Image (cartoon, grey):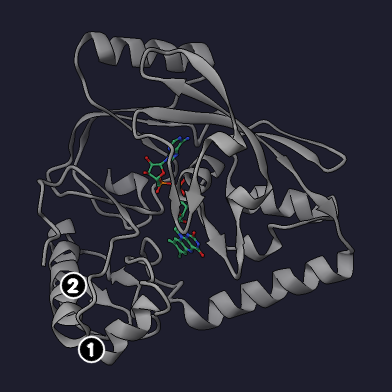
Amino acid sequence: MKGHTSYGIGGPALGLFYPSGERDLSAILVLSRKKSIPVFFAGSGSNLLVSDDGFDGFVISLAKTFKTLEINGGDIYAECGVMMGHFVKKCVGAELTGVESLIGVPGTLGGAIRMNAGAYGREISNFLTELKVMTLDGDVKQVRRDEVQFGYRHSSLRDDEIVISARFKFEKGTTEEIQQLKSKASQSRKSTQPLRFRSAGSVFKNPPEKAAGQLIDQAGLKGTRVGGAEISEKHANFFVNHGDASSEDVAELIRLTRRTVKEQFNIELELEIKTLGFSEGAFDA
Ligand SMILES: Cc1cc2nc3c(=O)[nH]c(=O)nc-3n(C[C@H](O)[C@H](O)[C@H](O)COP(=O)(O)OP(=O)(O)OC[C@H]3O[C@@H](n4cnc5c(N)ncnc54)[C@H](O)[C@@H]3O)c2cc1C
């Protein structure tokens, strides 16, 4: 999986599938079920740490095939393999306001919806009206926005359902304002994040009224290195891969950070990144 995550880390999966369409996806799910093979739905792996031992199951991604994007006034229909960068650019091009500050969030629309990706005060769920999901039986169902709970980097979407497409409603904005918000977000990202190195973005969620990066910095952990992994000097909530990091290096940094922040501030940091193929308790302080 190291070739399929932004971290560039991870052992093999039993299989990696890019289904060509809904029928194909349904067939893979039915087969997995029949053979009792676990499945994991991935987007482009930009929020994902895969264990060095890999994953004894099928990884299914829509990132290469589910690419339809249709704009009709303020209404957008998009399949979940559309990349967020493309989605934002299309919205901006159509003078639709709402997600311009999400420019620079890597990954697919599916991953963004599942994670309720957000930046600079806006979240993808703010503009969502409807989702289409497929269950492990290969059945498709429509889900209204109000049937799903969205919170900070959280949705109530289940691990055993894959989101295949979504509908959004946006307002018209002015080109000037949209461009301004977009450039501000883009510049801020470049000046605060270690974008030269491989990472999965923020490792931990911000605890209430605190910034995880600030706590890690105040705990004196910036620059701490285990093997090829390092707590970034530029943004302490980004753990970067210097090229040869193992997932165990990152896991050790996670445990160390949790332990230190708990000792110093009595705060338990919760993981924002998703993990695959680890044993239970692998990240416990
Ligand atoms: C440099 C950098 C900057 C980042 N900045 C931000 C930021 O500002 N804001 C932010 O919110 N995130 C940020 N991230 C994290 C990441 O980009 C987002 O979480 C992104 O939405 C993940 O999308 P993905 O397609 O890569 O999902 P993956 O990492 O592949 O998967 C993430 C989760 O979504 C699930 N998933 C993926 N696709 C589907 C689907 N179709 N149906 C159901 N579940 C699915 C997976 O099972 C997993 O649980 C950043 C990451 C990096 C590397």
Q: Which residue is mark 1?
A: 219
Q: SS class of the residue under badge 1?
A: loop
Residue at screen point 43% across, 27% down: 18
Residue kind at label 1, given as amino acid type: Ala
**Residue 21 in view of the camera:** no
In percent of width and height, residue 125 lies at 59, 48
**N-terminal of the two: label 1 or label 2?**
1
Gap between marks 1 and 2, in whole Å?
10 Å
Residue 49 drawn above or below residue 258: above
Q: Amino acid at mark 2?
A: Arg
Quadrant (top left/top right/bottom left/bottom right) for the N terminus: top left
Task: List x then y, in percent, for residue 48.
Answer: 33, 51
How crowded is the residue under tag 2: few (<14 C-alpha within 10 Å), some, or many (20+)? many
Residue under the image location 19 percent in, 64 percent down: 250
Res 63 seen here: yes
| Residue to which mark 2 is pinned | 258
